[in-house]
Amino acid sequence: MSSAQRVFSGIQPTADSFHLGNYFGALKHWVSMQEEGSECIYCVVDLHAITIEAQQDPAQLHRRTLVSYAQLLAMGIDPKRSVLFVQSHVPEHSQLSWILQCITGFGEAGRMTQFKDKSGKEGSDHTSVGLFTYPMLMAADILLYNATGVPVGEDQRQHLELTRDLAQRFNARFGKTFVVPEAIIRKETAKFVDLQNPTGKMSKSAQTAGGMINVLDEPKQIAKRIKSAVTDNEGVVRFDRETQPGVANLLSILGAATGRDPESLVADYDGKGYGALKTDVADAVVAEFEPIATRTKELLEDPSELIRAMGDGAQRARSIAAPVMESVSAAVGFVRIG
Ligand code: TYM
């Protein structure tokens, strides 16, 4: 990857801890892209968090935004090398979102599968208009920074396609303004599944207790959840997502934690059962998460320092976003005063 790459990505502050899917699917890549020398811009997307009624508790949102920001610092996002900020601190996101909403078709937005899933769960009386326009705000996040690459998990692919369509449409209608970004979705880490229901994605809204591991969980809890992960009756460690989704998931986790290709790990378990694999997965995950949890707790002891860092991040983000927003306004034909 060339150093000319400009990377943007975001995460919602909708839980008291990020989970394993977030971490290995996206956040660990955020850190490695920073280490590889890409220009990285990362955002805690608090405006997206309030699209669901259950996430609108003010004290909870405030706490989770701080916890999210602290976890990103703790896992190695360096605010000197990367821009790390909170979405609501940069008003250009909402401004550009509005304009993008005005070039998005109603039917096109209605086809977003995440909207269909989430609105299905909430029921129409509890589905906000904000949930419907969520993907246009996400497109605004990315396009405001002229990002070339967006590291995300598989579940964000359709949103990235919409973002590309909107960038191309805007450029064709109003003149070349936006870079058309590429999704960066690594096959090996694209989708971690629920430990208790290995046909479904690991997610904070999953219904199974014990199906998810949090970055901030106690080591004992992590080990317990991995040891009780659902496997199958084959008794042989193979990497086959179709026939052995639970075992393939454990191999994917171990691969992501150790930097090895999951398929290449199979040979290590020749003649061994699932117990040995689970022990190694638990050890590797604890080794990865424990220092992050410790550092996150330390950082949370001084919220004023976190808020100061957010202020710096917002200023840096705004210095990129504001000129882009000005060109958008000019392209659309808004009259400039002063
Ligand atoms: P969010 O907050 O749901 O998740 C953050 C990141 O974690 C990835 N992810 C997973 N990857 C693999 N396996 C899983 N089980 C898993 N669960 C979650 C997600 O794909 C994501 O990369 N809409 C976005 C946030 C967003 C954003 C953006 C992302 C807002 N603006 C601009 C990129 C660019 C979301 O809800 O992610």
Image (cartoon, rainbow, N blue to C red):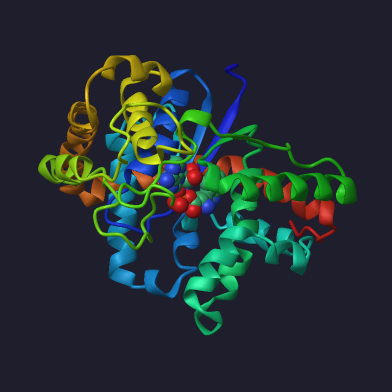
Tell me what residue is drawn at x 47 percent, y 25 percent: 33
Nearest the camera: 122 or 293? 122
**Location of residue 242 in the rendering, given as x and y in whole percent from the top left corner:** 48, 38
Measured along the vertical axis of the image, is residue 22 above or below residue 187? below
* Residue 314 seen by the camera: no
Give the quarter of the figure containing the C terminus. Answer: bottom right
Q: Which corner quadrant of the image does residue 131 belong to?
A: bottom right
Nearest the camera: 25 or 133? 25
Nearest the camera: 107 or 234? 234
Tell me what residue is drawn at x 37 percent, y 59 percent: 206
Residue 248 is left or right of residue 285, and the answer is right
**Location of residue 112 in the rendering, given as x and y in whole percent from the top left corner:** 65, 59
**Location of residue 14 in the rendering, given as x and y in whole percent from the top left corner:** 37, 59
* Residue 183 seen by the camera: yes
**Location of residue 301 in the rendering, given as x and y in whole percent from the top left corner:** 15, 48
Tell me what residue is drawn at x 27 percent, y 19 percent: 269
Give the quarter of the figure containing the N terminus. Answer: top right
Tell me what residue is drawn at x 78 percent, y 64 percent: 105
Residue 160 is left or right of residue 283, and the answer is right
Residue 133 is left or right of residue 275, and the answer is right
Measured along the vertical axis of the image, is residue 136 above or below residue 172? below
Measured along the vertical axis of the image, is residue 212 above or below residue 180? below
Q: Which corner quadrant of the image does residue 72 belong to?
A: top left
The furthest residue to the front: 234
The furthest residue to the left: 220
